[in-house]
Amino acid sequence: MTAPTELRVAKDRRRLTVTFPGREPVALEAELLRVLSPSAEVQGHSPEQRVTVGGKRAVAISRIDPVGNYAVRITFDDGHDTGLYTWTYLDTLGREQAERWQAYLDELAQKGLSRDAPGQQGRSP
């Protein structure tokens, strides 16, 4: 996968816009990137170990650091920084965003979890 021509974090730090050569930019919400982090902490070492992460509606991107020529490490304001977002993974998230988001919402509902952090219900957009 070719590297993006641009990675742009929104002023409010809640969205990352990724542009691949010859394609339209895709906006990925910080919450989506955080809850679908490719880290072992979230994904586990097998599908059975994958964790459904709730309470991240208000999460923001603190920083993005390049990792070689193939990925970026995204640090979130909740301290999570162990996922390496490869160009292929960012491309996949962009193409499958709607389906993956709905699957995440369904998992939250099944497990009785909320997008809001405890004590934050109704305060975040």
Image: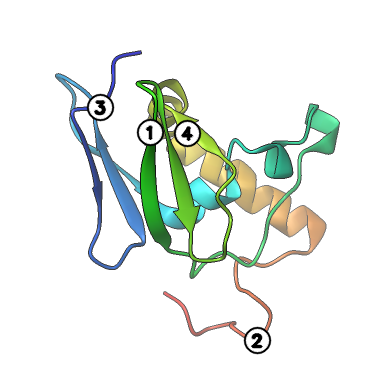
Label 1: how many Cα within 10 Å (few below 14, some 14–19, many 20+): some
Q: Secondary structure at mark 4?
A: strand
Q: The N terminus appears in which quarter of the rendering?
A: top left
Q: Which mark is residue 78?
A: none
Q: Which residue is mark 2?
A: 119
Label 4: how many Cα within 10 Å (few below 14, some 14–19, many 20+): many
- Figure quadrant of residue 6: top left
Q: Is residue 15 left or right of residue 88?
A: left
Q: Amino acid at mark 1?
A: Gly
Q: Which residue is mark 4?
A: 85
Q: Is residue 17 left or right of residue 69?
A: left
Q: The C terminus appears in which quarter of the rendering?
A: bottom left
Give the residue drawn at x 49%, y 65%.
77
Q: Which residue is mark 3?
A: 4
Q: Amino acid at mark 4?
A: Tyr
Q: Which mark is residue 94?
A: 1
Separation (CA) of disc 2 from disc 4: 30 Å
Residue nearest the viewer, comparing 104 with 7: 7
Give the residue drawn at x 47%, y 33%.
85
Task: Give the mark nearest the N terminus, 4 or 1.
Answer: 4
Q: Is residue 63 left or right of residue 82?
A: left
Task: Give the mark nearest the N terminus, 2 or 4.
Answer: 4
